[in-house]
Image (cartoon, rainbow, N blue to C red):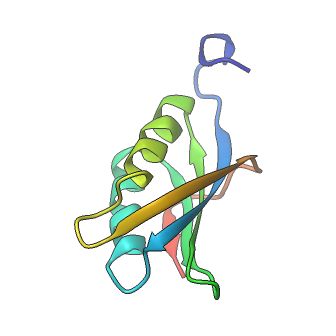
Amino acid sequence: MSVESQAPGTRSGRRFLVSGRVQRVGFRAATRRRARALGLTGRARNLEDGRVEVIAAGSEEALQALREWLDRGPALARVDSVEELGECDACGCGFTTG
């Protein structure tokens, strides 16, 4: 569904897997701050394989802005790749790390 065809207030969800130096560099906390600033809900959590999983829900525009931010990450991180796994169920309220 294109952004133009979405009804106002429609929320979409996305799941991202971020690879690189993304653990122990403040990546999850920075992601939470950025997501909240964009009005997104969801979570960011470390995976055992060294990646960070980000699940976010909100407007298509906000999700695209988060995706662009994830490609860079915070200053201490080094993002090698961001895999977008497509749509997922919209998340509850707030944005958490875990």
Farthest residue, direction front = 80
- Residue 16: % across, % down: 61, 57
Q: Nearer the viewer, residue 44 or 58?
A: 44
- Residue 21: % across, % down: 41, 76
Farthest residue, direction top = 4
Q: Nearer the viewer, residue 52 or 20?
A: 20
Farthest residue, direction left = 75
Would you place residue 39 above or below residue 91 in this image? above
Instruction: Name the side, left or right, on which 92 lies relative to 18.
Output: right
Would you place residue 73 above or below residue 67 in this image? below
- Quarter of the figure that contains the N terminus: top right
Quadrant of the rendered image containing residue 55: bottom right
Instruction: Name the side, left or right, on which 37 lies relative to 81.
Output: left
Instruction: Name the side, left or right, on which 32 lies relative to 98.
Output: left
Q: Nearer the viewer, residue 55 or 72?
A: 72
Would you place residue 1 above or below residue 94 in this image? above
- Quarter of the figure that contains the C terminus: bottom right
Which residue: 55% across, 55% down? Answer: 82
The count of marks equals 0
Instruction: Name the side, left or right, on which 30 lies relative to 7.
Output: left
- Residue 58: % across, % down: 56, 41
Q: Nearer the viewer, residue 14 or 96?
A: 14
Which residue: 64% across, 36% down? Answer: 11
- Residue 20: % across, % down: 46, 71
Quadrant of the rendered image containing residue 32: bottom left
